[in-house]
Amino acid sequence: EDQVTQSPEALRLQEGESSSLNCSYTVSGLRGLFWYRQDPGKGPEFLFTLYSAGEEKEKERLKATLTKKESFLHITAPKPEDSATYLCAVRDNNNDMRFGAGTRLTVKP
Amino acid sequence: DGGITQSPKYLFRKEGQNVTLSCEQNLNHDAMYWYRQDPGQGLRLIYYSQIVNDFQKGDIAEGYSVSREKKESFPLTVTSAQKNPTAFYLCASSINGEAFFGQGTRLTVV
């Protein structure tokens, strides 16, 4: 069965303090790894899709990378508005999509 | 503008009642999904539909039912058989792998 594990569960950073979120996965044939941002009481907002090891995607202060076992979401010089829960998901060869529990990020000014 | 609309935003249900959550999309996506989100847990798949008039059970389908009579609509009914229905429910649609979500419905049993 596919598994997605995100770490840490929660992360508190000072504004400007760069860090990384981890998403480890086991999947039967990776069809895509997805990162989402979710604000409290809202639906997840799509950020990135990664398809193969070595691939990288960037958007503003966020950069997502992918290896055969895990993905990282790097946050460079975060701002308070980056505070949210970040979700990782994988899609397998059966087209099933499985989500991790998320990392709750808080950025203090 | 295009997107996924869930309604209502908040819903209260008495014990023993069935309630239906609405999900409509105008993105022309074939695939639609219903997820349940509980505090500290990842999204869990309830039901999904890859095409009109066809749907499949997800990991936690017991106590729920769906229909897919139109491409744009995928309503979810939470039946009285669902013993712990209080949760945040998310509807999504998908094309080429990426799933796009509505803003959710928070269901509370009173």
Image (cartoon, helix red, strand yellow):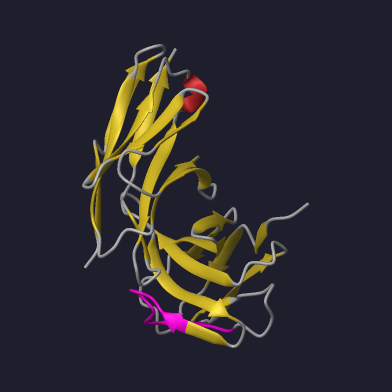
| Residue ID at (51%, 74%) | B14
Q: Position of residue B51 (x, y in %)?
A: 58, 80
Query: Residue B99's x, y, as percent?
Result: 52, 57
Q: Left of B105 or right of it: where is B7?
A: right
Residue A36 in percent (x, y) is at: 46, 44
Query: In terms of depth relative to the viewer, which is nearer, B106 or A61?
Result: A61
Which stretch is magenta?
A: B56-67
Q: Is residue B55 magenta?
A: no
Task: In this rendered view, identify the residue nearer to me: B63 or B28.
Answer: B28
Q: Residue furthest right?
A: B1
- What is the total number of numbered labels drawn onto the structure image? 0
Q: Is residue B8 above or below residue A68?
A: below
Picture layout, residue A26 above or below residue B47: above
The structure residue drawn at horizontal position 38% and vertical position 59%, both measured from the top left corner, is A31
Q: Quadrant location of residue B29?
A: bottom right
In this rendering, position of residue B16 left or right of residue A30: right
Name the image quarter holding residue A54: top left
